[in-house]
Image (cartoon, coloured by chain):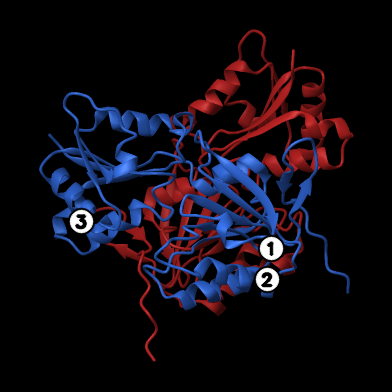
Chain colours: A red, B blue
Amino acid sequence: MTGWVKIAGLGPGNEALVTPEVTAALAEATDIVGYIPYVARVAERPGLTLHPSDNRVEIDRSQHALDMASEGKRVVVVSSGDPGVFAMASAVYEAVDNGPSDWRNLDIQVLPGITAMLAAAARVGAPLGHDFCTINLSDNLKPWEVIEKRLRLAAQADFAMAFYNPRAKSRPGKFERTLEILREECEPERLIIFARAVSRADEAIKVSTLGEATPEMADMQTMVIVGSSLTRTIDRDGDPIVYTPRFIAKAEG
Amino acid sequence: MTGWVKIAGLGPGNEALVTPEVTAALAEATDIVGYIPYVARVAERPGLTLHPSDNRVEIDRSQHALDMASEGKRVVVVSSGDPGVFAMASAVYEAVDNGPSDWRNLDIQVLPGITAMLAAAARVGAPLGHDFCTINLSDNLKPWEVIEKRLRLAAQADFAMAFYNPRAKSRPGKFERTLEILREECEPERLIIFARAVSRADEAIKVSTLGEATPEMADMQTMVIVGSSLTRTIDRDGDPIVYTPRFIAKAEG
C-alpha cells in the first residue's frame, strides 16, 4: 500500500461548505490527525483511526502523520477553514523540511477549504471585494513589533484587513493595542466587523466602527475584518450590508 | 414565489472544489447569470434559463439578476473562485446601493468558493501560510499609482503577496513594471510562483525568483504569488515545495 498525507480544509464549520475533494479524501483515509474539535467533525467508521491532539503540538502532529504515511497509511491532517491560511499546511512542510530526507518524496497534498475570512465576508456582503491583507494577530510565533509594523503599513496602503486569532487570555491587552494602532492610522468611522462562529449554529456578527469598537467584541472564535477607507454600508431592514466598491477614483491634483 | 439572488463561487475550475452549498443553489435556481465561461460550467436542465454575458458588463448583469429576483425568480450569479474576491459580490452590491430602494430588502446571499490564490498556494505547498496580501493588478477600475503604492508598502511590511489579473493585452508593460517595483523593494532570490489554470486539465505551475522572472511567465489566466522574505523551498524529485514558515524570530538588537 502506498501511503500519503492529505492536509485538508474542513471549512468554517457548516458541512455544506466542505468540498467534495475533502469528503472523498476522508472516505479513503486510514488515519485522521488534527486538533481535537476538528477531528470530532469526522465520522467514525471501521478501518478509520482518529488521532485527536491538543492545540500547540502542530509539529508533533505533523511528524506523526508523516511517520504513518511512510508506513503506508493514508493520512488526512484536518484543519478548519483552509489548511494554507494559519493552519496545518505550513506546520507539515516545516516538519518535512527538518525531517528525514525520504519524507520529501512522500505523496503530500494540500486540499483547499473555505477559509474563515471569506466565509465571514460572504455573510456581511463583500468587504474584501477589493485589495486586502490577512494578518494573524497572535504573537505566539512572531514578535509583536512585526504585527504592529504590518498593521501600520497595511493601513497606509489602505488595504481592507482580515485578522485571524485576534484575542486570547494568554495575550492580554494585545487586541486593545491593535485597535489603538488602527485608530491612530484610520478615521473613527472606519468599519470593523466581528464575525463569530461563522456558518455554525451559534453564529453572531456585529458591524461596528473603529470609534465604537471595544476589545470585548472579539474572542478566539472571532474573525475580525476592517474595511478600507472606501468600504461602505447599505442600510436596510435588519443588519446592514457591508461592501467595498470595485472602483477607486484618480486623486485630484 | 419569493425570489432571491445567490452570488455563488464555482471555485477555480475542478468540479471537486465546488461546495455542496453552491451545488444545491444551482439545483434550486430558475436563472443563472454570469460571464460566458462560468455560465458554461452549469449543466442545462428543464426549468433553468442560462443568461451568459460578456466580460466588463458586471453592473448590467447585476441589475438583470436583481430585476429577475424582484419578479420572483431564483437567480444564481456565478463567479469563478470566490465571489467576494475580485468577482461578482461587490458588483451586485454596487448595483443594490445605486438601485431602487426595494432591492435592499431582497434575499441576497453570497456563497463562498475556493478562490484562485488558495487553490494555487495548495498546489505548491503553503506560500501563504503566514501574513499576506491580495492585490488586483488591473488598473481598469483604479489608478495605477494606487497599485504601485500598495506594492511598495506590502513589500516593506514583508507580506507574501497574491496577484489577481496580473497581465492583459490592454495593459502593456504594467506587469513588467510590477516586477521592476518588486525588484527595487526585495532581494533577487525572492520566490515568485506562476500558477496557470489551477485545478484544470491544462494546469501549469512554475516556481521562479524575482531575479529570473520575466513578464511572459504570466497571462490573464495566471495567479502570481510572491513569497515573503522567509518563504523557502524544499527540494525533492520533481517540482520543489514552497512554504512560508510559521515562526518569525525576534530581531537582534
> In the displayed structure, does residue B244 sit left or right of residue B110?
right
Element type at marker 2? Answer: helix
Q: Residues within 10 Å of mark 2 (few under 14, many from 20)?
A: some
Q: Amino acid at mark 1?
A: Leu
Residue beneath disc 1:
B210
| Chain letter of the residue beneath label 2 in the structure image | B
Residue A210 placement (x, y as % from top left): 48, 70
Residue B63 placement (x, y as % from top left): 19, 54
Between disc 3 and disc 2, whose residue precedes? 3
Of labels 3 and 2, the one closer to you: 2
Residue beneath disc 3:
B60
Q: Amino acid at mark 2?
A: Arg
Q: Split into 4 quadrants, where in the image is the C terminus of chain B?
A: bottom right
Element type at marker 3? Answer: helix
Q: Determine whether label 1 and label 3 are within 8 Å by CB.
A: no
Write the residue at 69% across / 16% down. A30
Q: Amino acid at mark 3?
A: Asp
Write the residue at 75% across / 38% down. A92
Label 1 and label 3: CA atoms lie apart by 39 Å
Answer whether residue B228 is visible to the viewer in this image: yes
Residue A61 placement (x, y as % from top left): 77, 33
Vertical order, B173 against A45 (above or below): below
Residue at the extreme top of the image, as rendered: A46
Q: Determine whether label 1 and label 2 are within 8 Å by CB.
A: yes
Label 1 and label 2: CA atoms lie apart by 6 Å
Q: Which mark is residue B183?
A: 2
Residue B55 placement (x, y as % from top left): 30, 54
Q: Quadrant of residue A193?
A: bottom left
Element type at marker 1? Answer: loop
